Amino acid sequence: MFPADSVGLVSPQKIAFDTPLTLQSGRVLPRFDLMVETYGRLNAAKDNAVLVCHALSGHHHVAGYHSENDKQPGWWDNMVGPGKPVDTDRFFVVGVNNLGGCHGSTGPLSTNPETGGEYGADFPVVTVKDWVRSQAMLADYFGIGKWAAVIGGSMGGMQALQWAVDYPKRIAHALVIAAAPRLTAQNIAFNDVARQAIITDPDFHGGHYRRHGTLPRRGLRIARMMGHITYLAEAGLGQKFGRSMCHDTYQYNYDLEFQIESYLHHQGDKFAEQFDANTYLRMTKALDYFSPAEDFGDDLVAALKQAEAKFFVAGFSTDWRFAPQRSRALVKHLVKAGKSVQYIEIESVHGHDAFLMTDEPYIRAVRAFMKNVAGSPI
């Protein structure tokens, strides 16, 4: 039996688009697929639709279970479901795996229609603008003229922000959680080190590793371990691991000695078996390139003036990847642009990953905002 507030069993669906898509780079995808999951029902007016955008390693499986034997629900199951903050008794919720992903949408693992072989390293670099454009085509597929809300954390929040700038008539509310209007130099540096770990892995083979029957596991493992550290906070790590040892005494070698090391190795090994390295490279590049102000002379206020949505912005006290001052700066720019914005800064020990957690003030704030979304005409 599933919990009463779960959407229960869900099935993903692959939606094909045969219209060519010109990407920001100038490359063209002659056709593409998007893997999605939907929860709740689209009403007759088609004005109760909510788009959930995922973060770097996320996907379309936002809530519910794929089988009776699933041990874990979708990645944002604490947020989406009947009676939850994004209430599927009220909203038709769409989760989508982004272009370039490795969970069913067209990406490096897909067949290149021009060659008949796998794209691999030949799949183009995609951007947040490309994702938003493909998501607009997805909205057209469902007959959704305007999203009641677009919501996401981290890279997902960036997509919500890009939606508000690029398609102001098609989004009523934007929830930008643990995100920023562009990466800092430090964040770009973290991403490049992660990519270099993958690219320099001897099993990478220029990105065509699958043709050689290999996977760059070592590089992807290191990239994930380093990235995972940046998603966490010292407060949370200290509470969970401290300096706990794997053995009773020091071993005086380079094997695992501290519990935090064991945890990171486990996370890296698991990720390297589940995620595609070429996808990881493209997702981090999309983060690096993200800058909605770029088309407006790097004037963020000018960019935000395009928006017609009402905004919800959330930051977390121990998030040092997307520090709360970045969220506060976004709020100031939204106010200067004359936009309606609600801001909350949550005390949390979970670092950047706090947007996935159940800190009660955070859940309560999203619930209150979404109740207003449900009661607002679009």
Image: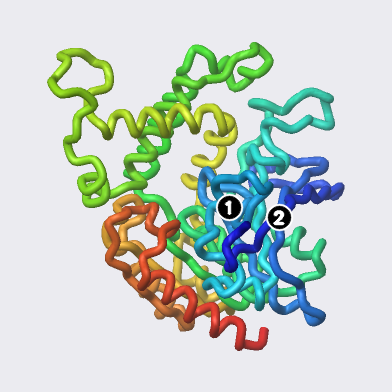
The structure residue drawn at horizontal position 54% and vertical position 71%, both measured from the top left corner, is 84
- Judge whether 224 appears above or below 362 on screen: above
Q: In the rendered structure, which amino acid carries the disc numbered 1?
A: Gly
Q: Considering the image in quadrants, where does the C terminus appear?
A: bottom right
Q: Which residue is mark 1?
A: 74
**Secondary element at image label 2:** loop
Query: Could you say where residue 236 lies in the image, as x and y percent from the top left?
Result: 26, 50
> With 133 as the anchor, is 334 left or right in this view?
left
Checking the image for residue 163, the label placed there is none
Q: Quadrant of residue 186?
A: top left
Q: In the rendered structure, which amino acid carries the disc numbered 2?
A: Val
Q: Considering the image in quadrants, where does the N terminus appear?
A: bottom right
- Judge whether 377 appears above or below 81 on screen: below
Dot 1 or dot 2, earlier in sequence: 2
| Residue farthest toward the front in the current orientation of the protein | 1
**Secondary element at image label 1:** loop
The structure residue drawn at horizontal position 76% and vertical position 71%, both measured from the top left corner, is 144
Q: Quadrant of residue 193?
A: top left
Query: Could you say where residue 265 lies in the image, as x and y percent from the top left?
Result: 37, 28
Q: Nearer the viewer, residue 65 or 217?
A: 65
Tell me the crowding category of disc 1: few under 14, some 14 to 19, or many 20 or more residues within 10 angstroms, Cα based: some
Q: Which residue is mark 2?
A: 10
Is residue 262 in view?
Answer: yes
> With 373 as the anchor, is 324 left or right in this view?
left
- Judge whether 228 appears above or below 183 on screen: above
Mark 1 vs 2: CB contact within 8 A:
yes
The structure residue drawn at horizontal position 82% and vertical position 80%, both measured from the top left corner, is 44
Query: Could you say where residue 285 lies in the image, as x and y percent from the top left?
Result: 51, 40
